Amino acid sequence: MWPLKWKKREENYRQARAGFFEAVKLLDRRSFLGVAGRAATIATAKAIVPPHSFQLVDVLGVGLREKPAFRFAYIADTHLYERTLNERFVAAAMRAVNDINALKPPPDFVLVGGDLAQFGQPKELELGKQILSELKAPLKMVAGEHDWYLDLGEKWQELFGPPNYSFHHKGVHFIGLMSVNEKDFWTDRKMTPLERMKTVAQLDSPIQSRFEVGEAGREWLRQALAKVPNDTPIVLMTHAPLYKYYRPWNFWTEDADLVQEILFPYRSVTVLHAHTHQVLTHRVKNIHFHGMLATSWPWPYAPEGLPKLTVKMDRVDPFDQLDGLGSGTVDVYGSGYVNKHYSLWRRDPITVAKAYLESWGKEAIPRSPEFPSY
Amino acid sequence: MSKRFYKFLILFLLVVFSLLAGFRQQQLPQQLEGLTSLIDSGPFSAVAQEKRELPRHSTAKSERANLVVQLCDGQTSLEIAGVRSGEVLPPTKARHVARQMMDKYAAEQAKQASKWTKRDRMTWEREQQRMIEEGNRLFHDWKALGGTIGVSCDMCHPDAADTHPETYPKFQPQLKDVAALRDMINWCIENPMKGKPLSCGDRKMVALEAYITSQRKGVALDPGKH
């Protein structure tokens, strides 16, 4: 009866292995021995003798041994039309909401990265609010250009409050920052609000201005940080990436250099941004940048300017309308740096660990895909 | 016949020639447009006829204030010694001058290695550009392309990125066949955009292909690449 015995052994092995990886995720120094014990269990289950051939050694990477202080989740770029026009984007947003509600343990809060609506229509924004109200965790909103340029943020602010705000959470200082201001390109062209909205909504539009935090926004940021000690970890939540990636598509912040200068004196700064609809990683000095997945549609990488630390996802499947999309979670550590998880609906999750950015890409390198991304 | 008559005749001929030249310039696009509106009475027929300045000839001048006669090509000209500018040629002399100019023109033409003229080149470029611009418009307008859920091509493909027309035809397992670029365009129109596929002869399809390929101009052909 050896095949049955073999099957049993294989089952034991699988169970032990799953337990091992579950435990590794939450590993700190105290539980190190416990997990090492589990590793030995796996080895025993596999009937590897002696067990020391499968010992947990100290190569797992700094990020994995430390336990995160807390976790929050994100949804971004839902680009909702009214339900009567487009059911698909609504269903996708709801899927993300369900995914996040199913997280165990639940996230401390949910960051919504902007572009909730497609053309900033009151009904689109209201639908967005209704869908997000299903989330069990509290909401933190960031405004995107698709939410803003029909009425210059009137409806959005009525529903979600001021676009710039800050709060303290478990030792980390969080800031929501409006990053999609544009210089007036519409008055001289005598555009209607909808024309202005549609111009900004077109990624490859040569007419619109480029995103900026702007003088007023930078001044607000200076004030918001004035009383924050330099060793307090800071997490910034924006819609546009706070750096210069690709200008023709507005993957760009025109005054990024000035904004970054405000952030340089702090020990650790993490910027989480939406807008680019792709896996995106960047670091400038003390600032770590992470992109977010969209739920509506993915974007290809720009033809140039991609940050070197980004491990590109390979190109999405044109025949699968959910590929390249999803939501995700962020594990925040005591230092303020984060492990960023991309929970893709159609692929294995991708984690960009803080150890990867802390080591400038030398350690904890995310798995890179077999095919090019174009 | 009076001198005044010949003066009038030459002027009349010049006007007729220049009108003919202008007509030929405009004729091609008009014919094309007639054709497209026959095939498709959709948004394509709404393409506005561009109003552009026709090229003007600059008349050659004589240093000795002699009469200079110019052919309607705007280049071949002849200075007639002994006849002052503004004077009118007698008929026999005029016929002689005309023959001389046509010989000069024919000699110039014979020197050219190609039968194609600069005007041909301008026509090709203008018509190509017109099609690319129409494709660009359709690429950004879901209604014009028959979409029904507010999704347009540019939403996933800014500047036609990630369309890689240079890799077609290639096998697409989901279509269970080797697909051309237009098969993929139609797939996108039918599925993500929830519209009706275009027929192969549809000028909208040609316009989309013109725009998409123009965005990848110069990229090496690599059919079959995934």
Image: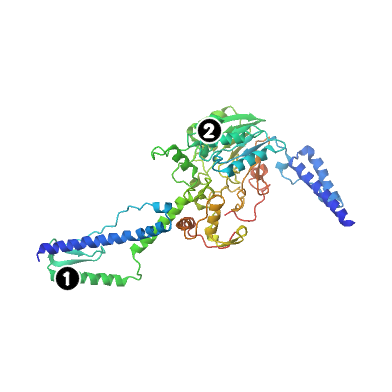
Q: Which residue is mark 2?
A: A156
Disc 1 target residue: B95
Q: Quadrant of residue A189?
A: top left
- Residue B32, x across and y down, in percent: 38, 60
Instruction: Please state which of residues A34 and B189 is positioned toward the viewer in this rendering.
Output: B189
Q: Secondary structure at mark 1?
A: helix
Q: Give the camera-side residue of B71 and A253.
A: B71
User: Secondary structure beneath disc 2?
Assistant: helix
Residue closest to the far right: A1
Q: Is residue B185 above or below residue B103?
A: above
User: For the residue carrying disc 2, how many other residues have a C-alpha within 10 Å: few (<14), some (14-19), or many (20+)?
Assistant: many
Q: Position of residue A346 (x, y in %)?
A: 65, 49
Which corner quadrant holds the N terminus of chain A?
Answer: bottom right
Position above or below: A257 against B12:
above
Q: Amino acid at mark 1?
A: Arg
Q: Identify which amino acid the numbered label 2 is placed on.
A: Trp
**Residue contact between numbered discs 2 and 1, judged by CB atoms under 8 Å:** no
Instruction: Establish if A272 lies above or below B77.
Output: above
Can residue A143 be spotted in the picture?
A: no
Outermost left residue: B2
> On what subunit does the disc labeled 1 rest?
B
The image quadrant that residue A105 belongs to is: top right
Q: Is residue A122 left or right of residue A186?
A: right
Q: Quadrant of the C terminus of chain A?
A: bottom right
Residue A373: x %, y % from top left: 59, 53
Numbered marks: total: 2
Judge left or right: residue A138 versus residue A161.
right
Q: Which colouring convention does the figure follow? A: rainbow
